[in-house]
Image (cartoon, rainbow, N blue to C red):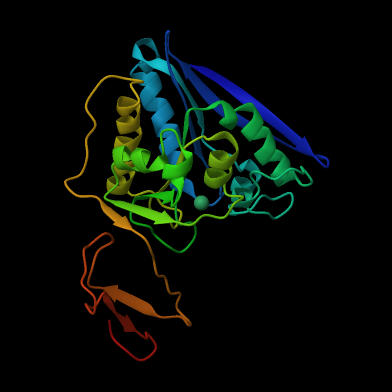
Amino acid sequence: MQTKFFTVSFGGATESLPYYVFEGSQKGIDLVVTAGMHGNEVNGMVLAREFVRWMTENDIESKMKGRVTVFPVLNTSGFGDFSRYVTHDNMDLNRQFGKTESDSFSTNLANQLSLNFFAKADALIDLHDAGNGAMLVPHCRIHKDDEINCISCSREMSKVFGTEVVYEREGHRNMMAVALRNLYNTPVVTVEIGGDQDVFKDLFEVGMRGLKNYLKYANIIEGDVELPKTQYYCEDRYSRKADAGIIVKWHKKLGDFVQAGESLGKFYYPLTQDI
Ligand SMILES: [Zn+2]
């Protein structure tokens, strides 16, 4: 394994991104794993680091085919501020891919990463979470027209990653997943696990299993893919933020199956009510 740094400069700002390269002696696919696109999403970063540790401690390089490159933190400045956005221009890095002009630090970073790493990759797994104040049940996100454009489309990648939920949606054209598919035909699966600046062991293990599953599916390592009994494909999602301070006592756990009309929890107003 080689530890390297990719340095990007724009407008007087410079960031050095650490990345790790595992290279097998036999030919195989070129996989890139990224995390920390949003600087406040720690689950992906910890998952990427743990994945590097697992690859290193188990000497995966001596028995693998192809190449695996891991970027644990793409948005290094945002992580320093614990912010979703890039510090140098307050932009969302995941809306800057596929732009022709490199007229900000973020677009320059997106373009440099694309040209030097992502365009050449056969597949990319991008790890996210819900950020501050929210939790997401582990799921993969894919895009509605992937089947038309991808050689090995992200729908198949989401299936083998093995989250119980797969969310299929329209994407913004400057999201990394959409831009890489449109420009370079690189299939990208976006993985969302947990959130709220904490790492939960059970959710985390879904991510580790998913990364190992993909290595097996893509013949980077040998072994059988471990899938859940059922995978649900969602075409829509709904969220609602509280209008005011309130406490919720949940009746359901994250990831529970619920019917329409069923109560998810009860609100308590702590100034006047017991919990
Ligand atoms: Zn994110």
The answer to whether 255 is drawn above or below residue 272 in the figure is: above
Judged from this view, the residue extending furthest toward the left is 229
Q: Which residue is the extreme one toward the bottom?
A: 272
Circle count: 0
Residue located at (20% from left, 72% from top): 259
Q: Nearer the viewer, residue 57 or 120?
A: 120
- At horizontal 24% and vertical 75% (from top left) the residue drawn is 260
Depth check: 257 or 123 in front? 123
Whether residue 249 is visible: yes
Q: Residue furthest top?
A: 25
Is residue 247 depicted above or below 172 in this figure?
Answer: below
Judging depth in this view, the residue of 19 and 30 nearest the camera is 30
- State which quadrant residue 28 falls in: top left
Residue at the outermost right position: 12
Q: Position of residue 168 (x, y in %)?
A: 39, 54
Vertical order, 265 against 163 (above or below): below
Q: Horizontal and vertical percent for residue 165? A: 30, 53
- In the image, is 192 to the left or to the right of 91? left
Q: Is residue 176 left or right of residue 104?
A: left
Query: Residue 225: where, in percent of width, then height?
Result: 24, 31
Residue in the picture at 36% in, 17% down: 60
Q: Please say whether residue 16 is visible from this viewpoint.
A: no
Above or below — where is 258 with respect to 223? below
- Image quarter in which the C terminus is found: bottom left
Q: Position of residue 96 (x, y in %)?
A: 66, 48
169 vs 38, nearest the viewer: 169
